[in-house]
Image: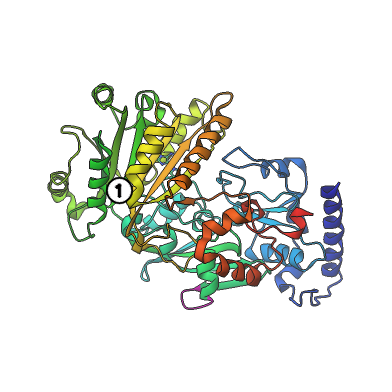
Amino acid sequence: MAARARLVAFLIGMASFLSIVAAGQIRPLPSGGQLPSGLFVHSIASMIRTDRNATTKASSDFGRIVEAAPEAVLHPATPADIAALIRFSASSKAPFPVAPRGQGHSARGQSLAPGGVVVDMRALGRGHRRINVSAGAGYVDAGGEQLWIDVLRATLEHGLAPRAWTDYLRLTVGGTLSNAGIGGQAFRHGPQIANVRELDVVTGTGELVTCSREESSDLFFAVLGGLGQFGVITRARIALEPAPKRARWVRLAYTDVTVFTGDQELLISKKASEAGFDYVEGQVQLNRTLIDGPESTPFFSGADINRLAGLVSRSGSGAIYFIEAAMYYDEATASSVDQKLEAVLEQLSFTPGFVFTKDVTYVQFLDRVRVEEEVLRSVGVWDVPHPWLNLFIPRSRIIGFDTGVLKGILGGTNPVGVILMYPMNTNKWDDRMTAVTPQTEEDVFYAVSLLRSAVAVGDVERLERENEAVLAFCTREAIRCKQYLPHYTSEDGWRRHFGTKWERIAELKAKYDPQTIMAPGQRIFQSSIASA
Ligand code: ZME
């Protein structure tokens, strides 16, 4: 079989590669590149595993929808080891695919390398912590393999913290920066990719390049939101701010989507200097998910749930909406936070009486999905298929989307999982980066995340059909939406996704990964090997 032949080619290639190293001949590779001298001493052979134990772990991801085994897994000790592997592939007669894998939290196989080599990025951080805080300069250098929770803990030792977060912190820096990294702070600070000052990248030609807005800026902008297509992020320099100590965390209930989105848009229009929230998201609860879902238990008391159930039955559609927001504070601002919260709440139009407040530490707030994870794990619904769909919707179309999708296609369903819906300011996104936003003139767009889990027989197929229907609805209604964490199986889908950015992306691909070996699980560029 082809896979078998490739494995043999790989091992033969590796053997001859090792003999070059063993013979002490550092000579130009066919591509003209030099072997890094460090490799001469520490060959990567001992870091490559081909046993089933290693390859099986790297054969699937959090999505549990696609599965494909790599031929081998590299456990690098240094970025130079990754460079050696990529250079070996890129310069060989039969290049093989290479995919970095952090936590494997992709939903559709984006971190897989069918027939190639998965780089277990987490191996980089073993033994020593690759996180260095420069407090005076206000940044942290974090290895691409580092988890955001560990970056948070390290920076807090200096009273500092990154400004932009994802909802879940057990993700790697390289993983979120390859996508965008969105959450309730993005309205003010932009996505995580907008808060990066510098990167180290091992490109698809096996070069280790330091890049920034000033230096090798084409690579810097390409890699941010670049879906792993141009190289592997081995270090990111991330901007920091003084860390708040605590968060006043609120949920406000609505039955009318127009009132809900109106309040969200008011909140995201506020400057940091005005009385407002530091974090703004929103959730949609269809039918009985609120009452049944384990997700809700940490926030609402039994009495709250009874009151909310009453609200659900009074809401004609059965849908209720929550703004989830947080106001950060510390010792200096503790005495005024209640007043500030009151001042903001007064401007909003949530259902009277339906405000729920919690007061938690900053870490408890940022790491809140961890609690959900533990609940879901305890009832066995964490390691299940996740046919997730994330969309960016232009502001002008969000009410139509709510009618057609949430109250239409998904109306009457009782999904297990979370539906998120919150606006962001377009001007916080840098269009030079590969990450894609709706290509309209509008200054606000919504993230709508249908984060549903498949827990029963037939759920995957049913949820996938619903996802298809949602995308078909957007096409039919000419809603210029973009997928976030995008997934397409045809080049045509990718061309439409990238729109005006496509030509530039193809050009950068040819420059930084001419053999199309990097991150094949995205299925953007069909490599000659993958299709062979
Ligand atoms: C892609 C994405 C997942 C964005 C947010 N999530 C979440 N996943 C699971 N539970 C969540 C959540 N956001 C809030 N709760």
Q: Which residues are magenta?
A: 212-216
Residue at image location 50% in from the left, 65% down from the top = 500
Q: Is residue 42 visible?
A: no
Nearest to the observer: residue 221 or residue 365? 221
The amino acid marked with disc number 1 is Val
Between 359 and 215, the one nearer to me in the picture = 215
Count numbered badges in the picture.
1
- Return the x and y of residue 225 as percentages of the image width and height: 50, 60
Residue 299 vs 181, above or below: the answer is: above
Badge 1 element: strand
Q: Nearer the viewer, residue 438 or 355?
A: 438
Res. 180 visible in picture: yes
For mark 1, what is the residue? 280
Q: Residues within 10 Å of mark 1 (few under 14, many from 20)?
A: many
- Which residue shows up at 46% across the image and 74% down it? 213
Q: Is residue 351 left or right of residue 31?
A: left
Looking at the image, which is closer to me, 1 or 123? 1
**Quadrant assignment, res 318:** top left
Instruction: Give me the residue at 83% from left, 64% from top.
Output: 18
Q: Would residue 376 appear left or right of 234 to someone viewing this image?
A: left
**Relative to 526, residue 134 above or below:** below
Ligand 1 occupies quarter: top left
Residue 323 in the image: state x and y as whole percent: 28, 41
The location of residue 358, given as percent across then percent down, is 25, 37
The majority secondary structure of the magenta stretch comes to loop
